[in-house]
Image: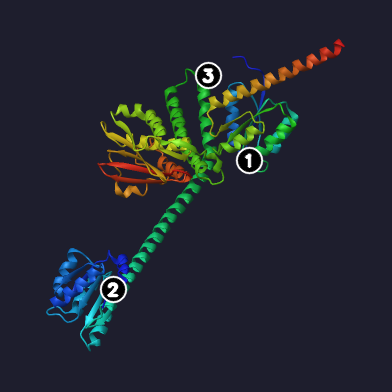
Amino acid sequence: MFKTPSRILLVDDEKDFVEMLTLRLQEIGEEVLQAYSGLESLEKLKETEIDVVILDVKMPGMDGIETLQEIKKRYPLVEVIMLTGHGTIETAVQGMKQGAYDFLIKPADFDELTTKLNKARERRHDQMERIRKAEANSLLRRSNI
Amino acid sequence: MSDSHNISDSSHIGEMNVLLVDDEKHFREILVKRLSQRGIIALQASDGEEALRLLEEKPVDVIVMDVKMPRMNGIETLRHVKDQYPATEVIMLTGHASTRDGVDGIKAGAFDYLTKPIEFEQLLRKIRQAQNKIRRAETEKKEIEFRERIKQQMAINERLVALGTIATGVAHEINNPLAIIQDSAGWVKQILAKPEMSTIPRRPDFEKALDRIQTSVDRARRITQQLLHVVKTQSAEIPDLVEMTEVNLRKLAGECIALVELEASYKEIKVSLESSDPNPIVWTDPYQFAQVLLNLLTNSIQATDAGGKINVVIKSSEEQVSLAVQDNGYGIPEENLTKIFEPFFSTKAVGVGTGMGLYISSGIVTKLGGVMAVDSQPDKGTTFTIELPVKA
């Protein structure tokens, strides 16, 4: 299957969880970066171009929702999938209202995770494509004058 | 003396039972007649023994009794009466100039005494006073019982809340390690699926173990998700999750029955629906209520032998609508009746029931402003009744 090369950032304070999910995603050919807190995730986003962030809702310090707001403010085109250990969909719904692409309830089914991951990536890809086209159009128009 | 001047007073003591005990037949009969003119029906006994025999058949509220009687005298009879029927009030009639008897009577538990010859109006007043005392005692008893019931209910509620808090805390904490277990096992599975791994020794053993891990994780996940769902349904912080609307209960019940009919048909169980009102309307959340109803129906199907019957009966009045799910299944042993609404209580096989169904259902019903009750007899069947207010 053809895959657009892309990067995933996994954000969760539970190190073992991050490690195991990274290994699984790498096993299917994904490139995965890790962050263990909201602040660290923002640093990683500054250093590297990321397509999709998988973000835990419940973290000490800067929690998932705050991190999401910050990510969306700085990098509005980055897609975010919320991971909620709460089962309370409210936080996830709140997250989606603030721009998260979708959510998953922990422990999440791996197939479901990859499906949502691919869709989020697709959306980002389409969006970037439209922006490129729009930019090209405006350049064309400008050069026509 | 005219008896007619305050006859209206008799109306409120009409339901009172009085027993008149005296060995003088003439005296008794006159008194009984006059009492009946005032709306009080009095039984008669000629001595203590007869009085006790009559009481065995039918207890009375007030006894009017002579102290001086042959064989068993008034005081002795009084002791027997107070011993066996402590709620009965006794008015003693003493002979002229024998105050001593009256005082003895009060010491033995009499309400009061009157000296013969008695004045009828005074006797009537005494009877009414005795009756008031009985009424007060009854009201107090009811109040105490009521308070006791509320206290018990509160204790149960507190326990459920505490259990819920602990359980959800545990659920939160367990989800993370559960996710790690799941992904670890999933990762090994992914590796096993690689072509270069196809020939490793004891491959079926690995697969079997991984499969068990996955099944168990799924089971634990189901439990934690249900637990967290409880918080969601019971938390007061998010009341808008309930979407109240006008619901035709008969239609909703019909839809729920349709959903379980296939499962019931496997066991040849007939599910029927009765409703006194063709359109019983309640104000409730149809989805949450349907969840409760489906839970009850599924329970009934599981608790009923092949060929059994399940009845859904809807009754409506102006203030409330009740819905009962009746089955003729195995029933619930008495010792389990108080436990079935607790979380994790299940008699189903391990892995089949999570013990959360009725806990969640009763939580939902309470939240919808209703009451859920159970009535069950082993080997005869079980009835769950939900009462809902017509309008919140």
SS for dot 2: helix
Label 1, residues with CA under 10 Å away: few <14, some 14-19, many ≥20? some
Give the amino acid at mark 1.
Met
Give the amino acid at mark 3.
Lys
In this view, the residue farthest toward the bottom is B97
Q: Is residue A3 above or below residue B364?
A: above
Mark whose residue sits in front, 1 or 2: 2
Numbered badge on residue B127: 2
SS for dot 3: loop
Res. B143 image quadrant: bottom left
Q: Is residue B128 left or right of residue B21?
A: right
- Earlier sequence position, callout 2 versus callout 3: 2
Numbered badge on residue B194: 3
Res. B377 image quadrant: top left
Q: Is residue B54 above or below residue A145?
A: below
Front-lying residue, A104 or B153: B153
Chain assignment, label 3? B
Whether residue A89 is visible here, answered yes or no, is: yes
Q: Is residue B224 left or right of residue A66?
A: left
Residue that numbered label 1 is attached to: A59
Residues at marks 2 and 3, CA–CA distance in whole angstroms: 97 Å
Chain assignment, label 2? B
Same chain for marks 2 and 3?
Answer: yes
Q: Which residue is at a point 68% across and 37% down the rendered structure image?
A: A67
